[in-house]
Image (cartoon, helix red, strand yellow):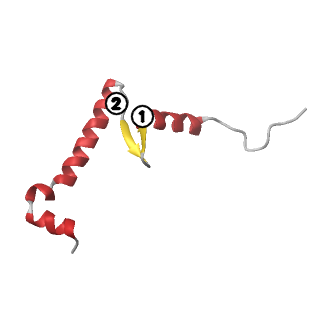
Amino acid sequence: MNKTSILAETDPDLAQAGAALERAARDARRLADQTDTPFIVFIDGKIVDLRKLEQESHIASTVNEPSEPYPTR
């Protein structure tokens, strides 16, 4: 048994902290979507607007590129 699980067993608030953090993150994301505001997170030690990153990746994935090289004349 690791130290975290021992603490979670002895402290009922700590045992529920993970679920509470997940709910808070979900609610914050929903609020950012509803108000069209940035959703800022840390990814690999960098500050990132997750909504903007997802929009950029969605745009990149919807571009229709031909499967063959462009024709030359």
Residue 27 pos. (x, y %): 25, 38
Amino acid type of the residue tagged 2 in the rendering: Asp
Which amino acid, mark 1?
Arg
**71 on left or right of 35:** right
Is 53 in front, or is 3? 3
Residue 61 placement, left or right of 1: right
Q: Is residue 68 above or below residue 5?
A: above
Q: Is residue 3 above or below residue 60?
A: below
Q: Quadrant of residue 10?
A: bottom left
Residue bearing mark 2: 33
How dense is the environment of label 1, judged by Cα within 10 Å: few (below 14), some, or many (20 and up)? some
Task: For mark 1, give the secondary structure.
Answer: helix
> Residue extending furthest front?
45
Disc number for residue 51: 1
Q: Quadrant of the N terminus?
A: bottom left
Q: Nearer the N terminus, badge 2 or badge 1?
A: 2
| Residue for point 28% across, 41% down | 26
Q: Quadrant of residue 5?
A: bottom left
Describe residue 32's horizontal placement relative to residue 23 as left or right: right
Disc 2 on helix, strand or loop? helix
Q: Residue at x 9, y 61 (%)?
A: 11
Which image quarter is the C terminus in?
A: top right
Residue 13 location in percent, x, y?
10, 55
Q: Residue furthest bottom?
A: 1
At 27% across and 42% down in the image, what residue appears? 25
CB of mark 2 within 8 Å of CB of mark 1? yes
